Image (tube, rainbow, N blue to C red):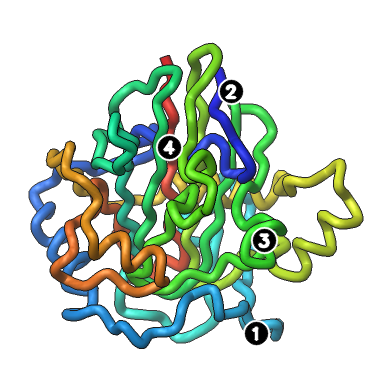
């Protein structure tokens, strides 16, 4: 199996909803969808600074403290704890899969479809909170590697802002070939863990620390999480979540989505809803882990 990574390291992103996505299409769908969309700003602030100008805190107080209980027996919320006052809003993540059509345009595609050689896709991620984004990849349940953040992108930073969309890969690339992931080779299934946190994950290098690590350990980069870190992420993936899926596909990417993505602005309430919305069941949860499978036939 294969997916053309081109010049960016996020080579295996996308996408059918993974094995750990639970509670989809429950009676509270409208409530979840409403909570997600109502948390968007009413109008886009054209003067808002780009997320790329922000940098992660350097003080120790900004890190998440992690319990040392036996991971196999711990409650999933104990895998990631936060010593700050508890927030009142859950962590949400909306994502939309875009596929390149015959005219080179981005159109919404069903995340559960199968992909074939020559298909080109990208994914748009929209968090509901300010925080941090991590993407890990495993192939055939092999050794996990961190493909985002990456020292070659945004100086290794991974800060996200609420409702500011992130495209993987970016449609802002000058070379059109770098704007899409292209499927090639034999078919198969790869898996992504998309992790949204309120605070940086402990023991995971980002920013200058990631750049320093990869400059002195080129043969060990992308960075591979320790067994302890990986066990916590897998536990987070099993936490209870609320999931809402959209059945509207084939529509082109809207101009408001294009502007918000390329300028680093927040999507407002008039923008189309994501294809999939996932939200933590608990408002106290400090992390949301989304597992996505890439199906290539």
Q: Residue at x 42, y 47 (%)?
A: 290
Q: Who is closer to the viewer here, 34 or 281? A: 34
**Quarter of the image where one finds residue 24:** top left
Q: Are marks 3 and 1 in contact (CB under 8 Å)?
A: no
Q: Secondary structure at mark 2?
A: loop
Q: Residue at x 21, y 72 (%)?
A: 268
Q: Identify residue for label 4.
A: 14
User: Looking at the image, is mark 3 or mark 1 nearer the viewer?
Assistant: 1
Q: Are marks 1 and 4 in contact (CB under 8 Å)?
A: no
Q: Identify residue for label 2.
A: 140
Residue 8 percent coordinates (x, y): 61, 45
Q: Is residue 117 above or below residue 86?
A: above
Is residue 75 visible in this depiction of the protein? no
Work out whether mark 4 precedes mark 3 in sequence or the reverse, and give the earlier one: 4
Q: Who is closer to the viewer here, 215 or 137? A: 215
Work out whether mark 3 precedes mark 2 in sequence or the reverse, and give the earlier one: 3
Which quadrant of the rendered structure holds the C terminus? top left
Q: Secondary structure at mark 3?
A: loop
User: Looking at the image, is mark 4 or mark 3 nearer the viewer?
Assistant: 4
Residue 222 percent coordinates (x, y): 73, 46
Report whether 108 appears left or right of 141. left
Work out whether mark 2 precedes mark 4 in sequence or the reverse, and give the earlier one: 4
Q: Identify residue for label 3.
A: 68
User: Looking at the image, is mark 1 or mark 4 nearer the viewer?
Assistant: 4
Q: Is residue 231 above or below residue 151?
A: above
Q: Where residue 293 is drawn, which disc sits there?
A: none
Q: Secondary structure at mark 4?
A: loop
Residue 128 percent coordinates (x, y): 33, 68
Determine the CA span between mark 4 and mark 3.
33 Å
Residue at the far right: name it: 216
Q: Identify residue for label 1.
A: 61
**Quarter of the image where one finds residue 91:** bottom left
């Amino acid at each position: 199996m294969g997916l053309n990574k081109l010049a960016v390291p996020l080579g295996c992103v996308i996408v059918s909803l993974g094995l750990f996505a639970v509670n989809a299409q429950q009676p509270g769908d409208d409530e979840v969808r409403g909570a997600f969309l109502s948390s968007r700003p009413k109008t886009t602030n054209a003067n808002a600074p780009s997320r790329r100008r922000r940098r992660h805190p350097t003080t120790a107080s900004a890190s998440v403290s992690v319990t040392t209980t036996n991971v196999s027996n711990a409650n999933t919320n104990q895998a990631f704890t936060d010593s700050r006052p508890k927030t009142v809003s859950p962590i949400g993540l909306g994502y939309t899969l875009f596929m390149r059509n015959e005219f080179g345009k981005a159109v919404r595609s069903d995340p559960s479809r199968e992909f074939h050689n020559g298909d080109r896709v990208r994914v748009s991620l929209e968090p509901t909170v300010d925080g941090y984004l991590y993407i890990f990849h495993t192939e055939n349940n092999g050794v996990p590697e961190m493909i985002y953040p990456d020292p070659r992108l945004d100086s290794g930073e991974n800060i996200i802002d609420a409702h500011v969309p992130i495209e993987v890969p970016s449609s802002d690339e000058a070379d059109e070939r770098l704007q899409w992931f292209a499927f090639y080779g034999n078919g198969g299934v790869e898996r992504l863990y998309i992790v949204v946190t309120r605070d940086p994950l402990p023991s995971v290098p980002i920013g200058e620390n990631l750049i320093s690590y990869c400059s002195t350990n080129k043969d060990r980069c992308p960075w591979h999480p320790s067994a302890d870190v990986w066990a916590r992420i897998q536990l987070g993936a099993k936490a209870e979540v609320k999931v809402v899926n959209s059945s509207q596909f084939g529509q082109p990417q809207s101009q408001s989505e294009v502007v918000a993505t390329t300028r680093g602005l927040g999507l407002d309430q008039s923008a189309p809803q994501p294809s999939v919305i996932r939200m933590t069941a608990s408002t106290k949860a400090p992390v949301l882990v989304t597992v996505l499978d890439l199906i290539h036939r």
